[in-house]
Amino acid sequence: MRDCIIIGGGPAGLTAAVYLARYHLSTTVFDDHSSRAATIPVSHNLAGFPEGISGRELLARMRTQLQRYKVQIRSEGVRKLQQEHVGFRVVSSRGSMRARTVLLATGVTDRKPPMLAERHDEAVARGLIRYCPVCDGFEVTDKRVAVIGCGSRAFAEALFLRSYTTHVTIITPQEEHELSEIEVNGLRDLRIGLQQGPIKSIDPERDTITIATASSIGVFSSIYPALGSDVRSELAAMVGAELSENGCVIVDSHQRSTLPGLYAAGDVVIGLDQIGTAMGQAGIAATAIRNDLNEASPLAR
């Protein structure tokens, strides 16, 4: 019986593990190596790294830090989460493990534009495809960018990027742009281009990325898919924790879910999808776990 099992090995999960280990709580991390942070070429928003740091390097440093506290990290995914009379049972492909508490840090999965996976991943690594204008809008200052998407989501992303560059175009992946008349007028006023699909091809080149539709070809420095994401909250739903309309785990101000003993932090909860936010939530969650366990049974050495 562990004090806490953390499901997810991204910035939220690994930060929480550091806190819990330093609280002298027995902790195991299940990491299936699917964290979105690992795909970040360089993060410049994380304070303390003036030259920036790649997502992979950041995660590697955090794992190295956990080795000092002998925290067990299991490189496997979790198939099932079960609530028991006391605590929870976590079931993976290699067996099961019990814990008094569970922290979900499973994140979300971005919906990708229509292209081969290998070419997509290479384009992301080179900054030709970007998913977070909050993170890297600064890097496309005064460059030609395209937003792939339709409706209000694409409109909002294009509007955000317009504060970095005058060269913004929305390209719809389908024939209909699903924009209201007010939104279309807003795009026109800000000189944001609107190009209807369907998209025929997306081709990364050396320093640019080309998008071909049925009617035209556009060449851009970067493209931003605004196609939405899928929240990885299936395990929370499995044990009956309450979810928001878009599938995020609903938590209180201490990252407690509606199910006692189950906590959540990072992109799997509603909030700003940023590394700094995930780390802050992780510290709050870990401290709440420590205090809740102490209330149930005083923690004394």
Image (spheres, rainbow, N blue to C red):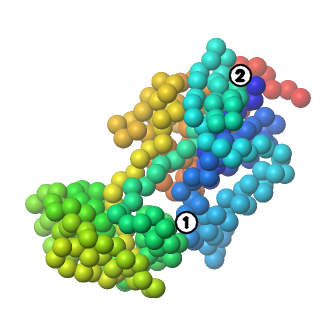
Identify residue type, mark 2: Glu
Answer whether residue 272 is visible to the viewer in this image: no
Residue 73 horizontal side relative to residue 106, left or right: right
The residue shown at (68%, 66%) is 57
Pointer 2 or 1: first along the chain: 1
Q: Is residue 295 above or below residue 57?
A: above
Residue 64, above or below 97 = below
Observer able to see residue 237: yes
* SS assignment at label 2: helix
Q: Residue at x 76, y 25 (%)?
A: 1
- Identify residue for label 2: 295
Q: Where is 289 relative to 18, above or below? A: above
- Which residue in the structure is indicated by mark 1? 40
Residue 112: percent from left, percent from top? 39, 60
Q: Secondary structure at mark 1?
A: loop
The quadrant of the image that shows the C terminus is top right
* Residue 40 shown left or right of residue 115 in the figure: right
- Whole-percent x, y for residue 150 in the image: 24, 60
